[in-house]
Amino acid sequence: MRIDILSKEYPPSIYGGAGVHVAELTRALRSRGDTDVRVHAFGGPRDEEGTTSHPDLPQLDGTNAALSTLGVDLTMAAACAGTDLVHSHTWYANFAGHVAGLLEGVPHVLSAHSLEPMRPWKAEQLGGGYRLSSWVERTAYEGAAAVIAVSAGMREDILRSYPSVDPEKVKVVHNGIDSQLWQPRPDPDAVRRHGIDPDRPSAVFVGRITRQKGLPYLLRAAAELPPEVQLVLLAGAPDTPEIKAEVEALIEGLRAQRDGVVWVPEMLPRDEVVAVLSGASVFLCPSVYEPLGIVNLEAMACGLPVVATATGGIPEVVVDGETGWLVPIEQVQDGTGIPVDEDRFVADLAAAMNNAVADLDRAQRMGRAGRERAVESFSWETIGDRTMEVYRAVLGQ
């Protein structure tokens, strides 16, 4: 069986959870030894066997980013000739999967890592391209042979956003974690290089600067943290100049009130992220939209308890009172996910953060429970097997 996996992100160019998912799923499927797995990814070049890079078309230089994306998709679709099944990830590659499926007469499976209707703020980033990306996503979902949701919460969002999609073809296969790559590895010297004091407790955020990650709410809540607790922000790749400016202003305001606010704006390599997590006291995930949240799994695998918003697929990962604290949120039902009462959400987030750092021994116990859960319930071997079951079902095997 030949499977062609289509993705915008693939090592070494990964900036979000979808890219991590594609890399780990590819490795798990290839390790089975019974499938020819080929990868098509944006950018390049790459020297990995079975992987083809697809750069932007020079003819589309200077056009809307969404239009440039579709140009790359067409080259990816052409490269899938001879495949038995195509599997696309995110709207960036969904068009390639849809076209390749039609062209080759093979099933198109797509994994849902996010949904355009749930991220209307992307119109700030893409302009008219957001209408184009929304059309691509809808067309792909409605035409796919199967849709893989990374959580039960994500499955509900898919069926609500695209009611014409047959519920029978939407399957849940959770994201996973490599618990060998992500495990506690304290490295005080590494964290010192980033301005973090390894001898002080710290609360850590890791993520892109985008509306869905809820970073402005976290920065407001962090004003209530005890003065001895450091706030560490591994936060980069802002979606827009506006969100970057807002976050910068909030960080400056917080630094004017207290010390121990550390912001690392560049995306760090994994070993350095592991070092920061391994030396921390608690992980913070204030997202207002999160289909599952690989970052929470990564933190748990490194032995950290998690303070996270009770939204999307997060409650399927973080067990309230056992591996962390879930912060309640009532959200506006217009696709933005913003809290109905922003001040209440900030206050509840601050209370949970303070609860987490009030008893560091308890936090460590929760962190150990979190690692056990990550290892036992979210292995990539299991996820590879379940994904293969979806493939075989749509191929009638």
Image: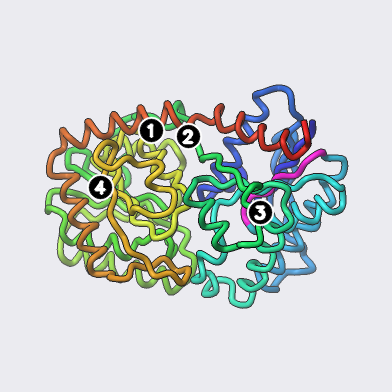
Label disc, if present, on residue 166 of the rendered structure? 3
Q: Is residue 345 left or right of residue 245?
A: left
Label 1's element? helix
Query: Which residue is the site of mark 1?
Result: 301
- Taking the magenta stretch, the answer to whether it contains residue 86 is yes
Label 2's element? loop
Query: Which residue is the site of mark 4?
Result: 203
The colouring scheme, among rainbow, by chain, secondary structure or one colour, is rainbow
Q: Main secondary structure of the magenta part?
A: strand
**Labels 1 and 2: the sequence-earlier one:** 2
Which segment did they paint magenta?
84-90
Label disc, if present, on residue 10 of the rendered structure? none
Label 3's element? loop
Q: Is residue 9 left or right of residue 296?
A: right
**Labels 2 and 4: the sequence-earlier one:** 2
Spatial CA span between label 2 and label 4: 21 Å
Spatial CA span between label 3 and label 1: 35 Å
10 Å neighbourhood of mark 2: few (<14), some, or many (≥20)? many
Where does the image place residue 6, in percent across and percent down from the top left? Answer: 70, 47
Amino acid type assigned to the residue bearing label 1 in the image: Ala
Q: Residue at x 32, y 46 (%)?
A: 194
Label disc, if present, on residue 177 of the rendered structure? 2
Spatial CA span between label 3 and label 2: 29 Å
* Circle count: 4
**Labels 3 and 1: the sequence-earlier one:** 3
Residue that lies at the very extreme toward the top in this rendered image = 33
Label 4's element? strand
Q: Residue at x 19, y 42 (%)?
A: 201
Where does the image place residue 396, in percent across and percent down from the top left? Answer: 78, 35
Q: Are marks 1 and 2 in contact (CB under 8 Å)?
A: yes
Does 191 appear above or below 380?
below
